[in-house]
């Protein structure tokens, strides 16, 4: 049956409106969470089982770079990696990945005790991480068992900033070869731009996800009722670095940071609509699972992210 021209025009117009509406709403984001620094935050499997998170950063590989010393993983109250007590996390990691959650090893953290002081340090650490946490086979005693993590998160807050770009390059070079899966890279810089610790590494353009910490830094974070400082900083980050996606890093509860917490209603109404205009918008990163459990922040915001 032929469609009258006026009806055909209306149908086309309606289709165009629906297409535009779908495209404008399709740029949704996801939530990344840090897990590992509080034994009261539930298991890794339970964390992924919430369905709230697309990324879980296992925190932290907190000591590395000292000549002759093996890098140290610290999972606080969860397990002791050096008595093989964390190898049972293999099943949890596999369960997370089967649900589409990317599980990353986060290196660094706020406690310090790490530094890379040469190209060799960077190459050595990359090989250690590859063999012990990623797709390598050069270690018979993997701290988390046989599970193969999806990548490495750089939460660098001290030490020498000069060689993290080399570390990123070495890690990226291991992925995608001989059937091995890609090594994803993420970073958690502070919001003052450029970040003093990972700024040089981010200049490599090798990072897939950058979750900027928009907290504990009043000049570039949300202030009650005002998004000005945050948006000015967001624009610096999205225009100033080459990364696939930029995330808004936030404390998951007021007690999780000294400042920068954004109430869920304010995040949904004032902040996220402005950020989603960027093609680099990736979602929200939260510190941490323990604090997220306190008031269900991720559950409150996930439909808006």
Image (tube, rainbow, N blue to C red):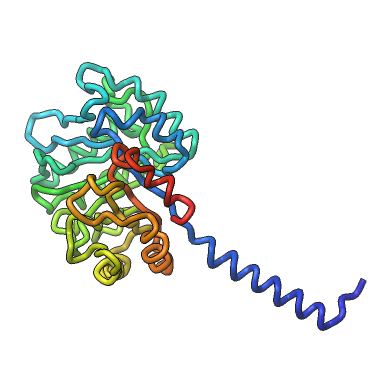
Furthest residue to the right? Answer: 1
Please report the residue visible at 33 percent of the width from the left and 23 percent of the height from the top.
145
Question: Where's residue 65, x and y in %?
Answer: 11, 38
Question: Where's residue 155, x and y in %?
Answer: 22, 46
Comparing 298 with 10, the one in front is: 298
Please report the residue visible at 14 percent of the width from the left and 36 percent of the height from the top.
64
Q: Is residue 78 shown above or below 260?
A: above
Question: Where's residue 70, x and y in %?
Answer: 14, 28
Residue 267 lies in quadrant = bottom left
Furthest residue to the bottom? Answer: 6
Q: Is residue 12 shown above or below 166?
A: below
Q: Is residue 171 shown above or below 128?
A: below
Residue 261 lies in quadrant = bottom left
Comparing 291 with 161, the one in front is: 291
Side of 88 where 256 appears, left or right: left
Question: Where's residue 28, x and y in %?
Answer: 48, 57
Looking at the rendered image, the quarter that the C terminus falls into is bottom left
Please report the residue visible at 83 percent of the width from the left and 82 percent of the height from the top.
5
Count every numbered label the image shows and give the total. Answer: 0
Comparing 127 with 255, the one in front is: 255
- Is residue 206 in sight in this rendering? no
Q: Is residue 189 shown above or below 122?
A: below
């Amino acid at each position: 049956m032929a469609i009258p021209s006026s009806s055909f025009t209306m149908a086309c117009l309606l289709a165009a409106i629906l297409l535009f509406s779908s495209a404008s709403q399709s740029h949704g984001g996801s939530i990344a969470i840090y897990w590992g620094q509080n034994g009261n935050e539930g298991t890794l499997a339970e964390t992924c089982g919430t369905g709230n998170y697309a990324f879980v950063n296992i925190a932290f590989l907190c000591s590395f770079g000292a000549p002759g010393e093996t890098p140290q993983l610290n999972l606080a109250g969860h397990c002791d990696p050096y008595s093989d007590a964390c190898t049972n996390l293999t099943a949890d990691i596999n369960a997370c990945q089967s649900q589409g959650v990317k599980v990353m090893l986060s290196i660094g953290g706020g406690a310090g005790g790490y530094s890379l002081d040469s190209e060799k340090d960077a190459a050595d650490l990359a090989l250690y991480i590859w063999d012990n946490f990623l797709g390598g086979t050069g270690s018979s005693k993997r701290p988390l068992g046989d599970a193969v993590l999806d990548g490495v998160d750089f939460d660098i807050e001290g030490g020498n900033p000069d060689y993290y770009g080399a570390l990123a390059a070495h890690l990226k070079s291991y992925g995608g070869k001989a059937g091995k899966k890609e090594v994803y890279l993420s970073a958690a810089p502070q919001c003052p731009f450029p970040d003093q610790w990972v700024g040089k590494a981010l200049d490599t353009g090798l990072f897939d996800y950058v979750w900027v910490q928009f907290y504990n830094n009043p000049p570039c974070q949300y202030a009650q009722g005002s998004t000005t400082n945050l948006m000015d900083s967001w624009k610096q980050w999205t225009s100033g670095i080459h990364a696939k996606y930029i995330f808004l890093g936030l404390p998951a509860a007021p007690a999780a940071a000294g400042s920068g917490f954004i109430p869920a209603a304010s995040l949904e109404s004032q902040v996220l609509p402005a950020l989603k205009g960027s093609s680099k918008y990736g979602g929200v990163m939260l510190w941490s699972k323990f604090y997220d459990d306190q008031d269900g922040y991720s559950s409150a915001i996930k439909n808006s992210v």
